[in-house]
Image (spheres, coloured by chain):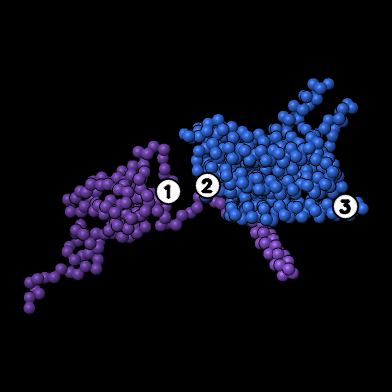
Chain colours: A purple, B blue
Amino acid sequence: MADDGVHIIKTFSDGLKGLVSAYWVTLKHLFRKPITEEYPEYKRPLPSRSRARIILTRDPDGDERCVACYLCSAVCPVSCISMESAEREDGRRYARWFRINFARCIYCGFCEEACPTLAIQLTPDYEFCRRDILSLVYEKEDLLVDHGGKNGEYNFYDHAGVLVKGDKGTHINEAKPVNLKSNLP
Amino acid sequence: MWLLGFLLLLIKIAVLLAIVLGLAAYLILIERKLLGRLQIRYGPNRVGPFGIWQPLADGIKMLLKEDIIPAGADRFIFKYAPAVVATIAILIAAVVPFARDVTVWGRTIPMVICDFNVGLLYVLALASLSVYGVALGGWASNSKYSLLGAIRGAAQMISYELPLGLSLVPVVMLAGSFSLVDIVNAQSRYPFALLQPVAFSIFIISAVAESKRLPFDLPEAENELNAGYHTEYSGMRFALFFLGEYVHMIVLGALVAVFFLGGWRGPFLPPVVWLLLKTMLVPFFLIWTRATLPRLRYDQLMHFSWKILVPLSLVNIVISGGVMLWLRA
């Protein structure tokens, strides 16, 4: 009987202690400064790799990087990228038209990962929603920018692809062409 | 002469109604702001400075929303259940005295809408009636969530009425009257909360359960029952349920003030201000609780009422009666 009494008192005091400490914790939070960032007034600076509006970049020479290989449109899970390829006189490929439907885009960044020439890139600019859904279909001239994005120095045609400048074997890290005739045993 | 009295009564009713409804509307804002601050965020602050027009915006929104009555609902009961909740909550406010009687031109004007000699029983009776709004609203919706919420609500409110009523017995014993005016007058020297801390805490806990607030919000447990008994309600009928809940909170605050904190009595400030301050203590405590405690399990809820609160309040009655007899002898 005495044990029961001690047990009841202990349960009661433990419960009371738990209650009081819980209320104390919430009360302390009442006097803390809220951590809310109030959006339209304060815009949090986003990391440069945040994924939002997509751009088509240019290489350091000012040419379009995109070679219209269709890899981005193939990997796109919502099929929001479409294009038509064409070829320049010097053999370099480009997109005759290039279209991204941002009303569909889920900003997954797969296109950026798939791109062999680092042409298509996602930027931290996310504030471009519109009431008119058709105005979210961006054409090539809306997408194209005049800088190299995250990799300003990179030029795909310096490393691989058809020759657009210089001779055979002038790609970076490419061996000189072997002279078959001097290579006889 | 009776016409003058009738006019005075109408004026008092209008003022009280305006105050209670205005307070209820702003209590929603206060709750959202306070809850926000307790969770280290700002509450609503977009409509007007500090969001003070938020209740207005909410009201306009609610009025303009489509009023949906689900197919298969009992239309008549479905339509009137929210009104039952709101009306009953407001009716309780009628017996709360808000100041000392005023004498104007030799006429004594009681500063209470209705000084019932059984005011306390009237309060308890109305508190019991408010189960009907919940139960009928949930039943008439013809939805399983609503019905479950309604059943829980009915069981919970009936269970917690018992300790609610029993905790008031010592108050009646101390005041020697069922009239709320007399109860306030009996606390002219010290509030009953000092004499009856156990009854005070039991009353507060039962009041939380009666107003269906966390941690006793099983009738509307969001993550189990969507919204419980008002799942199927929309537009102004939903708003009425909400209004009823918040008026209920204020009225319970007023009752706690009257029964345990000395009503409008207090130094320096005018009586109405004292009553308002004391009234807002309970809503503040309820909001604070909502930010602190998780919801109880259903069996814990029942266990707590029947096995702890009811016996405790009975023991409290016996002990207070004994002490009073001993003091008198």
Front residue (pair A27, A165): A27
- Position of residue A175 relative to residue B32, above or below, is below
The chain letter under disc 2 is B
- Residue carrying label 3: B325
Q: How far apart are labels 2 and 1 at the CA level? A: 37 Å
For the residues labelled 2 and 1, say whether their Cβ atoms are less than 8 Å apart.
Answer: no
The chain letter under disc 1 is A
> Where does the C terminus of chain A fall, quadrant-wise?
bottom left
Q: Residue at x 51, y 44 (%)?
A: B145
The label on residue A126 is: 1
Residue B239 shows in this picture: no
Front residue (pair A117, B261): B261
- Position of residue A132 relative to residue A159, above or below, is above
- What kind of element bears circle 1? loop
- What kind of element bears circle 2? helix
Position of A14 with respect to B41 (left or right) is: right
- Residue carrying label 2: B225
Q: Residue at x 83, y 21 (%)?
A: B1
